[in-house]
Image: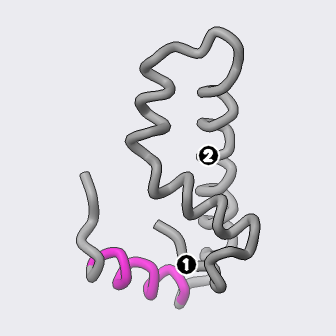
Amino acid sequence: YRMLETIRQFGRARLRDSSEEDRVIARHDQYFLELAELSFEAGAKGDSLARLKSDYDNVRSVLERSTGADGNSEGS
């Protein structure tokens, strides 16, 4: 399932207006970091790699935020 860009932007704006933005972004980043780590552990099954592939946009947004490559803190 992929969100329409306008819905994602609306949700992101609402999150930005709340006091929860930093906590939610940190949790998002942690979740996808853990998913990536599990996917690359020895003996990882194909389904974990497939899951990682299906969440590529989320993983990419975490990588961009962690390297400062996105120029802001926007993510998926």
The answer to whether residue 12 is magenta is: yes
Q: Main secondary structure of the magenta part?
A: helix
Residue type, numbered disc 2: Tyr
Would you place residue 23 above or below residue 73 in this image?
above
Would you place residue 64 above or below residue 74 in this image?
above
Would you place residue 49 above or below residue 35 in this image?
above
Q: Which residue lies furthest to the front in this view?
A: 69
The answer to whether residue 23 is magenta is: no
Q: What element carries label 1?
A: loop
Q: Report which quarter residue 3 is drawn in.
A: bottom left
Residue 1 coordinates in the image, percent (x, y): 25, 51
Say which residue appears at 55% left-offset and 78% top-offset: 74
Side (left or right) of 75 relative to 69: left
> In front: 64, or 74?
64
Say which residue appears at 68% left-offset and 74% top-offset: 69
Say which residue appears at 34% left-offset and 84% top-offset: 10
Q: Residues within 10 Å of mark 2 (few under 14, many from 20)?
A: some
Residue 72 coordinates in the image, percent (x, y): 64, 84
The residues bearing labels 2 and 1 have C-alpha atoms spaced at a distance of: 16 Å
Residue 29 coordinates in the image, percent (x, y): 65, 56
Residue to which mark 1 is pinned: 74
Residue to which mark 2 is pinned: 31
Which stretch is magenta?
7-16
Residue type, numbered disc 1: Glu
Q: Report which quarter residue 16 is drawn in.
A: bottom right
Q: What element carries label 2?
A: helix
Q: Residue furthest top?
A: 43
Comes first in the chain, label 2 or label 1: 2
> Residue 15 has which mark?
none
Q: Residues within 10 Å of mark 1 (few under 14, many from 20)?
A: some
> In front: 7, or 57?
57
